[in-house]
């Protein structure tokens, strides 16, 4: 399967070319821009980035090491396939790490943070009625990582980023499910748990904040379980 050239921006500076390719690829994977099982070839990626093969090869090597990609027999890379067992495993890890980050964040969240989180929720809901599914998922990610940033734990944030990276194939499944629902009243339903989180933050309620983030992850997991079951049937 070819790589859509509108996913990436050309890398202009030689000093940043390797990191630029890596960062853009990493973000594309994290936000579900590729199909589960899709093969990524160096030739197609190099054309998309407007670079030689070397920085693409290095980026793919790093992403394989992070278990975001699988190495194919011909030296290309492949997006991991989805399965219910892998989904459940990832979600268990996400619940453990993201709920801890949320607990640590609660006492650190400022009034300004709450205003910005509420703004992000409103933008998320507006985008759901007016824009693309990827723009909507970008706002979802912005909300989560703003919250986790308040944990002030560099280690936890790095772990969460890695888990979201490995969750990429499932994000792709979500885009296929959500896209037909955009511009309908269903779009706002995806902010319910985010609003519960903000309410808990306002009350400095650690237990409620943790419960809301767990409910958010579990709702996504349950939806994806159903989608995987439909594909298998």
Image (cartoon, rainbow, N blue to C red):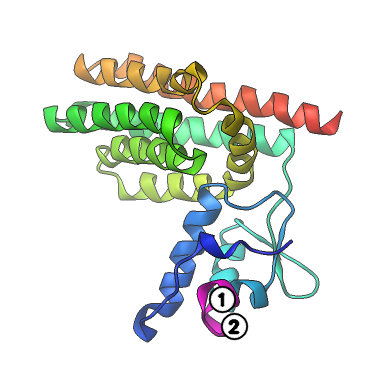
Residue 68 appears at what percent x and percent y? 60, 56
Tell whether 25 sits left or right of 16: right
How would you rate the neighbour count of disc 1 (Cα within 10 Å): few for under 14, some for 14-19, many for 20 or more? Answer: many
Disc 1 + disc 2, Cβ < 8 Å: yes
Left or right: residue 61 versus residue 144 is right
Residue 104 rendering spot, x and y as whole percentages: 28, 32
Give the distance between the C-alpha atoms of the residues marked 1 and 2, in whole angstroms: 5 Å
**Residue at point 72% right, 56% down?**
38
Mark identifier at residue 56: 1
Q: Residue at x 35, y 41 (%)?
A: 142
Of the pair 141 and 177, the residue shown nearer to us: 177
User: In which quadrant will I find the C terminus?
Assistant: top right
Q: Is residue 73 toward the left or the right of residue 15 in the image?
A: right
Q: Between 185 and 160, which is closer to the camera in this rendering?
A: 185
- Is 129 part of what is drawn in magenta? no
Q: Which residue is mark 2?
A: 53
Residue 24 in percent (x, y) is at 46, 63
Q: Which residues are magenta?
A: 46-56
Regarding mark 1 in the picture, which secondary structure is present there? helix
Crowding around mark 2 (Cα neighbors within 10 Å: few <14, some 14 to 19, many 20+) is some
Residue extending farthest right: 233
Instruction: Identify the image quadrant of the N terminus.
Output: bottom right
Disc 2 is placed on an element classified as: helix
Identity of the residue drawn at 57% across and 51% down: 33
Does 54 sit above or below residue 146?
Answer: below
Per the rendering, the mark at residue 179 is none
* 158 or 145: nearer the viewer: 145
């Amino acid at each position: 399967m070819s790589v859509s050239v509108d996913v990436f921006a050309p890398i202009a500076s030689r000093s940043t070319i390797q990191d630029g390719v890596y960062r853009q690829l990493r973000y594309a994977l994290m936000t579900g821009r590729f199909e589960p099982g899709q093969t990524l070839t160096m030739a197609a990626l190099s054309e998309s980035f407007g670079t030689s093969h070397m920085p693409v090869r290095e980026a793919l090597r790093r992403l394989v090491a992070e278990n975001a990609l699988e190495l194919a027999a011909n030296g290309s890379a492949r997006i991991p396939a989805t399965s219910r067992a892998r989904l459940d495993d990832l979600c268990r890890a996400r619940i453990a790490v993201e709920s801890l980050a949320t607990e640590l964040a609660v006492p650190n969240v400022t009034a300004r943070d709450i205003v910005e989180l509420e703004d992000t929720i409103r933008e998320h809901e507006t985008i759901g009625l007016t824009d693309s599914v990827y723009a909507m998922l970008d706002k979802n990610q912005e909300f989560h990582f703003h919250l986790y940033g308040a944990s002030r734990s560099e280690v936890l944030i790095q772990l969460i980023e890695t888990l979201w990276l490995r969750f990429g194939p499932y994000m792709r499944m979500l885009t296929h499910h959500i896209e037909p629902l955009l511009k309908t009243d269903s779009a706002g339903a995806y902010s319910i748990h985010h609003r519960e989180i903000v309410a808990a933050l306002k009350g400095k309620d650690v237990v409620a904040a943790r419960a809301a983030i767990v409910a958010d992850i579990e709702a996504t997991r349950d939806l994806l379980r159903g989608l995987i079951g439909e594909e298998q049937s």
